[in-house]
Amino acid sequence: MASQKIVLPGETIGSDVLPIPSNPNLPLKLGPGLRHAPPSTITATIAGPLCIDQKKNAIWVESNSGRYIPQPNDLIIATVHHSSTDFYSCSITPYTTYAQLPQLAFEGATKKTRPQLNSGSLIYARVLTASKHTDPEIVCYNPSTGKSEGMGELKGGMVFDVSMGMARRLLMAKQREDGGVAVLEEIAEKVAFEIAVGRNGKVWVKSGGVKETLLVGRALQEADVLGLTVEEQVKLVRKMIR
Amino acid sequence: MTSITLSTIHRADGSATFTGNGYAVIATVNGPIDVQRRDELPEEAAIDVTVRPAGGVGGVRERHLESIVQKTLRHVVLVSAHPRTLIQVTLQIVASQEDHLNYGSLPQTSPYIPILPALLQASILALLSASIPLLMTLTSTLIAVKESGGLAPCPSAQDLRAATSIHALAFSSYGDLLVVESEGHFTSEKWEEVCTRAWSICHGEEEEESGSDDVSMGSQGGARLENVLRDAVRQKVVNEDKWKQSPLITAT
């Protein structure tokens, strides 16, 4: 990712830019923002920097803005809108079709023992299926293990909006090294809190009191909006905690 | 002269401000969102355009502008990517040259063509900001033909009033003509000349300053509109990647 090439919609990605796979059997992966027109034309559909991962033989266009489009396996924070006999209808982003959450898609849920969710309650869920032609389906357990793995209803706390790019950075395995987010680690040294990050640009924070919860949320939002580097984030947190 | 800011309105999915040639337009895009049943298209996204004038409520003129912008955007947006959804484009005119022109008390009597390039530019920028998948980008410009027969690109209010004809043209990023709206008396040869000139403003190479009878040519600055668009996107990317400038990241 040394050279950041910016593409605009309609631009053709030349074959000289494409990553060279180490293994010729490895297929080229096209990420978001790119479109393949047979036989071998690749055009960009959104504007942004073109990113290339040589190891995975993948190419995509990064974007930080716009509305969240559900993708399978994304972790999201959704609001229950209403419930029907078999499903809860949940809203992932405002003014879009509701995602279907089966009432039995929780850890250890049976017909008799299933969580009762009221409209307005928050859930941390995983997108099971998402396609442009159907409503997305979300679940609150891992279908292969049957365990909740942290998903389910989020009780108490507050939700904060962050940008899509920030949500992605927070969900990285190495938050500080890859994502450049040091806010949470810094605050955690002084204040205990629980956090859940949704890929749809929502962050749920719960801690001992309102003051602490707001501190975490506001610090995250500020780091996001101002584009603070790790050092600046450390400084910001020290200032806010004092 | 033209100034562009992307993502000015943070509650919308995408937004942009376009200022140029005496016009200022704020565009916002929301989408893909739920569409009303009667507007739903089974295989493509519906596009809804609203134009709001700088003062008062919209009338026939605004409805006509909406329909031109809507028909253009339908071919620019990759509508098949989000079927049965709505992409909502709102264009708020903030400043317009007509304020200085006296066309009578009714705003409807002023020509609709001069504002069109600003509307098209603002809407495409907002779509870029909203990361809506597009087939191409577009650039648009306004040219007035003077009484002397010379061309005035980016005409001022006085130029417009004195012009024998005015033309708004938009080109896709592939260089194809997308929109042409003309008003006044002109010959087909003159139109060809206008079209060639507009193309070079939007796409052409930095050509020699041939405008012998153009007063306003200097203010054009010679910057191709396509480059202006790219610079705006680059500026946005730089802003978003500010956090990466940490030495901790570059070391790894």
Image (cartoon, coloured by chain):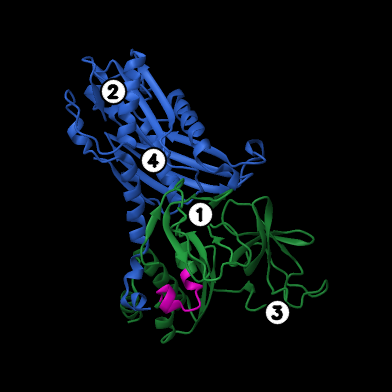
Chain colours: A green, B blue
Residue B101 pos. (x, y %) = 26, 23
Which residue sits at x=40%, y=67%?
Answer: A1
Residue B71: mark: none
- Labels 2 and 4 share a subunit: yes
Residue B155 pos. (x, y %) = 25, 27
- Labels 3 and 2 share a subunit: no
Q: CA distance from mark 4 to mark 1?
A: 21 Å
Please report the bounds of the magenta region as a residue range: A169-181
Which residue sits at x=31%, y=50%?
Answer: B231
For label 1, the crowd category at 10 Å Cα-Cα, with few meaning under 14, some 14 to 19 and many 20 or more, is many
Q: Are marks 3 and 4 in contact (CB under 8 Å)?
A: no
- Name the residue carrying label 2: B144
Callout 2, which amino acid?
Ala
Q: CA distance from mark 3 to mark 4?
A: 49 Å
Q: CA distance from mark 2 to mark 4?
A: 21 Å
Label 1: chain letter? A
Callout 3, which amino acid?
Lys
- Name the residue carrying label 3: A147
Most foreground residue, B15 or A192: B15
Decide if residue B212 is on the left or right side of residue A204.
left
- Labels 4 and 1 share a subunit: no
Label 4: chain letter? B
Which residue sits at x=61%, y=47%?
Answer: B34
